[in-house]
Image (spheres, helix red, strand yellow):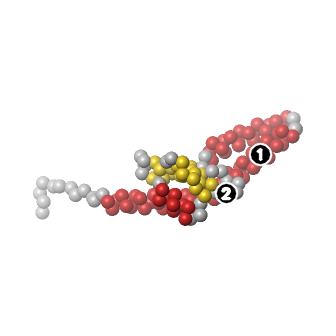
Amino acid sequence: MNELANELESKGYNIKIQGNTIKIRLGGLTNPVSVTYDLAKDQYDVGTRDLPLGIIYAFLFSISLYGALVFISFLHAFMIAVCAFGFVSLIITELRVSPLRYFIAQKNGMKSKEKKQVNPSLKTWTMNPR
């Protein structure tokens, strides 16, 4: 995990290691991103929490829009603006995390190639060797 953190830091990412997780701050209006190591899959996973945040923003947007249609107030307009800001933040996060996802996919691919080279292929034994 430390070697991945060193490589990410050399690529210019703002990282912070917390246990088995690398927290990455992409800067600007982006949400925090985390990279974890999954022992079962033997690969790194990138987490952005976009699905829960998108559901929350959509729910708040629908409630605020309904409230604005029933009774126009400053609170409803403010909540619609906050939801629009949240959606923009999600889009910017996805745009900025794509090079990181590509890099992590390359690292996972290299790990699987190394694993295949370490394990020799098994030869089958037959009754009549020729």
Which residue is painted at 65% across and 51% down in the image? 31
Tell me the crowding category of disc 2: few under 14, some 14 to 19, or many 20 or more residues within 10 angstroms, Cα based.
few
Give me the C-alpha separation between circle 2 and circle 1.
19 Å
**Residue 105 appears anywhere in the view:** no
Which residue is painted at 42% across and 47% down in the image? 39
Which residue is painted at 54% across and 48% down in the image? 18
Left or right of residue 15, residue 129 in this image: left
Left or right of residue 80, residue 98 in this image: left
Q: Earlier in the sequence, mark 2 or mark 1?
A: 2
Closer to the camera in the image, 64 or 128:
64
Closer to the camera in the image, 34 or 120:
34
Tell me the tag on residue 82: 1
Tell me the crowding category of disc 1: few under 14, some 14 to 19, or many 20 or more residues within 10 angstroms, Cα based.
some
Tell me the tag on residue 29: none
Tell me the tag on residue 27: 2
Image: 85 above or below 100: above
**Are the residues at dot 2 and dot 1 in contact (C-beta closer than 8 Å)?**
no
Image quadrant containing the C terminus: bottom left
Which residue is painted at 63% across and 54% down in the image? 25
- Number of residue marks: 2
Provide residue 86's location: percent of width, then percent of height.
72, 48
Q: Which amino acid type corresponds to the residue marked 2 in the rendered image?
A: Gly
Provide residue 94's location: percent of width, then percent of height.
63, 55
Which of the 4 quarters of the picture holds residue 60?
top right
Q: Which amino acid type corresponds to the residue marked 1 in the rendered image?
A: Val
Left or right of residue 125, residue 110 in this image: right
Provide residue 10's location: percent of width, then percent of height.
55, 65
Provide residue 70's location: percent of width, then percent of height.
85, 34
Give SS at disc 1: helix
Left or right of residue 98, residue 59 in this image: right
**Residue 87 appears anywhere in the view:** yes
Image: 9 above or below 64: below
